[in-house]
């Protein structure tokens, strides 16, 4: 997603801002401001799905998009991810767990996020500091002021411009979605009560930070969720507001369902998708 070329087949809205996917920056245009958007929510809430979809649309509009996940996103961070999520490491203590997430974050912020924002990229991050508050603060019960201080230390002043909080029907539903394919990692095995506390914590975080954190339900069709995600970002990317109203079919491709054989099936409720898409030109 680092290049500014439009993805094939992605619509371009007529009311696109000064820059359209076909036009480069003219010499006198100021570089665009970097935008930092994080996606949060319980396990299996749909973060990966919607980050990927949004990233495609943003790069079609000519933005450099950097997609990241936490823990991870750097070599060191991915190694730390392997340690903290490995179910074999069942004896990691809560303090050590917190510091591993913070170590991965400090590396990601300094090595990737800060430079990307400086360049004017859009950074989409699958989890960030709110996850630490929810999982280590509320879930594990660590001192919240200390968790906040550790977050601040790792972030070096970088705060998301917007956080999309995706909410599934329940923690159990999300966990079922998350573990369906690959089994449960160390955090996903923390128990139902733990995950209920985490999900409640996310709602509390959203209530306390209404400007930054926007709640979007991910319990229905993915296309509906995606429309709401775009709508909640329309003040940061002004073309998105009109785009949502004028391009329903663009979102419906998310409701495409892949069969085990790799064929593409279309659910009944997406039967209105345009013909070209129904012959297999879906994006995701
Ligand atoms: N409205 C929805 N939006 C997104 N995903 C949905 C929705 N409804 C069902 N799903 C399903 O939920 C599952 C989990 O999606 P995804 O992997 O994007 O979640 P995630 O939050 O990134 O999970 P994890 O916490 O494991 O990283 C997928 O199988 C996806 O198809
Ligand atoms: C950043 C962060 C993450 N976690 C937990 C949340 C999830 O259970 C895993 C990450 O797995 P995912 O499939 O990428 O969602 O780690 C946490 O407990 N604390 C954190 O700060």
Image (cartoon, rainbow, N blue to C red):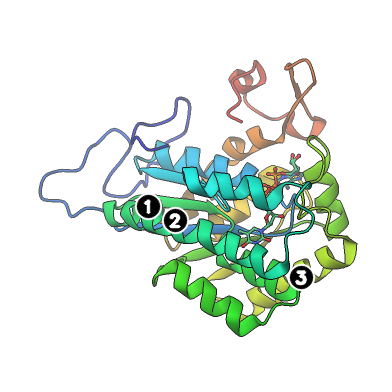
Q: Residue at x 79, y 30 (%)?
A: 267
Label ID, residue 107: 2
Q: Residue at x 59, y 81 (%)?
A: 146
- The answer to which quarter of the image holds residue 237 is bottom left
- The answer to which quarter of the image holds residue 193 is bottom right
Task: Indicate the position of residue 197 as horizontal and vertical percent values.
Answer: 80, 71
Asked whether residue 209 is in view, the answer is: no
Q: Are marks 1 and 2 in contact (CB under 8 Å)?
A: yes
214 lies above or below 217: below
Label ID, residue 111: 1
Looking at the rendering, in which quadrant would you find the C terminus? Answer: top right
The CA distance from mark 1 to mark 3 is 29 Å
Q: Residue at x 45, y 25 (%)?
A: 8
The number of discs equals 3
The CA distance from mark 3 to mark 2 is 24 Å
Q: Earlier in the sequence, mark 1 or mark 3?
A: 1
Question: Would you say the beta carbon of the disc 3 residue lies within 8 angstroms of ligand 2?
Answer: yes
Residue closest to the far left: 28
Name the side, left or right, on which 49 lies relative to 266: left
Name the side, left or right, on which 221 lies relative to 247: right
Which residue in the protein does label 3 denote?
139
SS under mark 3:
helix
Label ID, residue 224: none
Task: Indicate the position of residue 68 as horizontal and vertical percent values.
Answer: 50, 47
């Amino acid at each position: 997603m680092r290049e500014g070329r439009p993805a094939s087949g992605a619509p371009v809205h007529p009311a696109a801002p000064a820059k359209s996917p076909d036009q480069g920056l003219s010499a006198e245009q100021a570089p665009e401001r970097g935008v930092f958007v994080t996606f949060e929510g319980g396990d299996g809430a749909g973060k990966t799905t919607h980050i990927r979809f949004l990233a495609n649309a943003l790069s079609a509009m000519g933005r450099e998009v950097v997609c990241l996940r936490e823990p991870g996103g750097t070599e060191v961070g991915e190694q730390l991810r392997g340690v903290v999520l490995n179910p074999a490491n069942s004896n990691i203590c809560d303090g050590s767990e917190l510091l591993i997430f913070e170590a991965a974050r400090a590396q990601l912020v300094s090595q990737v996020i800060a430079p990307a924002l400086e360049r004017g990229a859009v950074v989409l991050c699958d989890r960030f500091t709110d996850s630490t508050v929810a999982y280590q603060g509320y879930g594990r019960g660590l001192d919240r002021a200390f968790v906040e201080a550790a977050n601040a230390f790792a972030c070096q002043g970088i705060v998301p411009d917007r956080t999309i909080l995706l909410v599934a029907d329940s923690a159990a539903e999300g966990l079922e979605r998350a573990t369906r394919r690959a089994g449960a990692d160390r955090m996903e095995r923390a128990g139902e009560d733990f995950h209920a506390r985490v999900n409640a914590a996310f709602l509390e975080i959203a209530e306390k930070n209404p400007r930054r954190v926007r709640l979007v339900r991910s319990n229905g069709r993915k296309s509906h969720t995606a429309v709401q995600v775009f709508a909640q970002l329309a003040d940061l990317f002004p073309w998105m507001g009109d785009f949502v109203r004028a391009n329903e079919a663009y979102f419906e491709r998310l409701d495409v369902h892949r069969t085990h054989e790799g064929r593409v099936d279309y659910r009944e409720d997406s039967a209105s998708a345009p013909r070209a898409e129904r012959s297999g030109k879906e994006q995701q």
